[in-house]
Image (cartoon, rainbow, N blue to C red):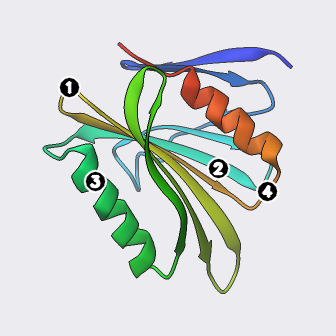
Amino acid sequence: MNKNIFHSGNVSFEYLDSWAVEDADTFNNPDCIATLSKGENNLLNIVAFPTPTDLNSYKEFMENTISDDGGVILESDFVQIACMDAIRLHGNIKTPDITFDIHTYVFIEDGNIYIFELRTADYSSKTIKEYDEMISSLKLE
C-alpha cells in the first residue's frame, strides 16, 4: 500500500491509500478540517479550534461526555506521540442502531486544540494500527 500526505492549514500527516479523504462536514461542524474513511465501518474526523483549556481539564471533559452519553471508557491516558503530549481515549458506545468504538487523540498546542476521533465498528487491530501510524506522523507547523 502507498502512503499519501494530508495537508490542511498547519496540520499534516501520512495515511495509507486504503483510506479515502472525504469532504469535511463544515456545514454541521465548522471546525472540521478533515474526514477520512476506510470502508463503511471506519470514519476519522479531525477538528481544530482555538481553546483556553489544557490537557488535564479536557481529559476530564471528554470522559464525562462519553459517560454522560452512556458510553464506557475503556482507556484514558496521557501519552506522548508525534513528539507531543496528548490525551489518548478509547471508549465503547452502544446506540439502538449500532455499537462502535471511539478512539481519540487530543493535542493542545499554541492555544489551539486538535482532536482526531476515529469511530469504528471494525474491531480489527489492523485498522487501529493504521490510525495510530497516522497520528504518529502528525506534524503541526
Most extreme residue toward the right is: 1
Question: Mark 2 or mark 3: which is in front?
Answer: 3
Q: List the residue tagged with mark 4.
A: 122
Q: List the residue tagged with mark 1.
A: 110
Question: Mark 1 or mark 2: which is in front?
Answer: 1
In the image, 129 versus 117, the foreground residue is 129
Amino acid type, residue under disc 1 in the picture:
Asp
In the image, 128 versus 36, the foreground residue is 128
Rounded to the nearest angstrom, the CA distance separating label 1 from label 2 is 27 Å
Rounded to the nearest angstrom, the CA distance separating label 1 from label 3 is 15 Å
Left or right, 94 with reference to 107: right
Disc on the earlier residue, 2 or 4 = 2
**Residue 115 lies in quadrant:** top left
Q: List the residue tagged with mark 3.
A: 58
Q: What x and y, as percent, mark residue 138?
A: 50, 22
- SS under mark 4: loop
Amino acid type, residue under disc 2 in the picture:
Leu
Left or right, 128 with reference to 28: right
Rounded to the nearest angstrom, the CA distance separating label 4 from label 1 is 34 Å
Left or right, 10 with reference to 136: left
Amino acid type, residue under disc 4 in the picture:
Asp
Rounded to the nearest angstrom, the CA distance separating label 2 from label 4 is 10 Å
- SS under mark 1: loop
Rounded to the nearest angstrom, the CA distance separating label 2 from label 3 is 22 Å
